[in-house]
Image (cartoon, grey):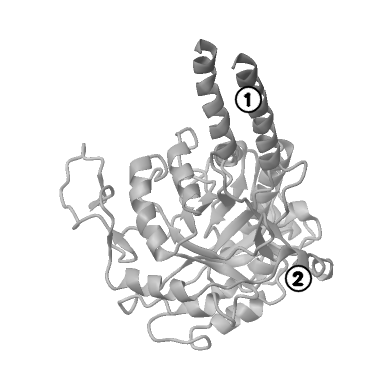
Amino acid sequence: MFPSLVLTPLLLAGLQAVTVNAISTISATGAKFFYENGTQYYIKGIAYQLTPEDPLTDEAQCKRDIVRMSELGANAIRVYHVDASADHDGCMTAFADAGIYLFVDLDTFTTAIDQTAPHWNKTQYDRFSAVLDEFQQYDNTAGVFVGNEVLTTINGSIAAPYVLAAARDIKAYRDKKGYREIPVGYSAADISELRPMLQDYVACSTNSSERLDFYSLNAYEWCGESSYSTSGYDELQKNATGYPIPIFFSETGCNTPAPRTFDDQAAILGSEMDGTWSGAIIYEWIEETNDYGLISYGASVSNAAATNTLVVDGYTRQGTPTPVSPDFTNLKTHWATLNPTGVSLSAYKSSTSAITYPDCPSSTSGGWAVDPSSALPTLGQTYNKDAASADSTGTGSSTGSSSGTTASSTKNGAAGNMMLAGNPATERLFAASIVLSGVLGMVAFWL
């Protein structure tokens, strides 16, 4: 009897090891995302920066918010800033249990790539890789961003090679560590002067290590009673047709005029765009001074005590999530009727051999300033304007490391392959099954 009692906790632990975070992973194949069972994945996401530093450490709050997210029909969140050293097990498991995936930014307020003085150094690399180390362990991590709105003017195009250099090195780090191939991408500001050059540049290399795994756009063009053509979404679709990697809206949801109708979701997740685009992430979860929120935790609070950690920038960030009306209901109503099925992985794979990559955009005087024939920056390199002017490389020369500068948050807010050998998720389950088999064998022996 005693040995059985001793082994029971071991048996339960073995069962827990097999079932924890048991959610299908997301992979990028060609221009689409897929679940492990081969079904295409479309994003219905929410920008979730509830607290400025890290919203994924308060399990109880995550669970309260998940109830409302599930009511909306959300299957993804985007988080801009996290603490890589914190414990995220509770929140990530709760999101996984609800079928909600994470797209997480790798930078911080001090390590974001800067368009005015672009550089890519070890401080940035270490921070980016630390976030990847933390979140690669969760099967519901769907993708990571190496930058958010780094380029916001045509003059900022000099930073584009540094974005790609970061992606190249993070992908190499991911592969060296033996992590699953979590897609590595970039979230771009919708700047007409940069279209379609930036979008083409980050996907034009025939060397997969030097192009993004996905590209996304922060676009707020569809406002009020608009339409597919009036909003300019028809142009976004035109530029994305035939794009070789997944593309989606990493922020959307114009709030002028109010209320927010989210009518653009019918285009993005409907027949006009769902053959090309992989969905959208709505900006944002919490209501703040910018009036983009879907949820409120109470009225704004002025002159809150500095010791009151529940109030940041005048807004309570914990408690019962209350929908902002009618915005919450408007989005919920749209998403309930929009369920694109896309294409199966087995049917799609045969067409991936025909994928072509866009021509790399040429540099132009006073415009796009990147020479497509130039090598990407190396780790430790800083853009040298004088050297770039002299040799017209657009990537500058190495002048050593420097620290990061500005944050990349926006809107002034807080902000597939089937299971086969070699898949880390499969290997973890296999290892767990061996442990469990051994435990069961011991139980049988002692009984």
296 versus 57 height, above or below = below
Q: Specify the quadrant of the image occupied by residue 172.
A: top right
Pick the quarter of the image with the C terminus: top right
Sequence-wise, the earlier of marks 1 and 2 is: 2
Q: CA distance from mark 1 to mark 2?
A: 55 Å
Residue designated by label 2:
358
- What is the crowding at mark 2: few (fewer than 14 residues within 10 Å), some, or many (at least 20)? some
| Left or right of 199 in this view: 325 | left
Type of amino acid under label 2: Pro
Q: Residue at x 72, y 43 (%)?
A: 423
125 versus 418 height, above or below = above
Answer yes or no: do the residues labelled 1 and 2 have beta carbons within 8 Å?
no
Residue 425, image x, y percentages? 66, 41
Q: Residue at x 72, y 75 (%)?
A: 242
Q: Residue at x 67, y 54 (%)?
A: 36
| Left or right of 419 in this view: 127 | left
Q: Residue at x 62, y 23 (%)?
A: 439
| Left or right of 219 in this view: 62 | left
Asked if residue 303 can be seen in this view, the reply is yes
Type of amino acid under label 1: Leu
State the residue in front, 193 or 429: 429
Residue 382, image x, y percentages? 63, 46
| Left or right of 245 in this view: 115 | left
Q: Nearer the viewer, mark 1 or mark 2?
A: 1
Query: In the current view of this chain or complex, which residue is farthest to the top?
Result: 2
- What is the crowding at mark 1: few (fewer than 14 residues within 10 Å), some, or many (at least 20)? some
282 versus 164 height, above or below = below
Asked if residue 414 can be seen in this view, the reply is no
Give SS at disc 2.
loop
Give SS at disc 1.
helix
Residue designated by label 1:
440
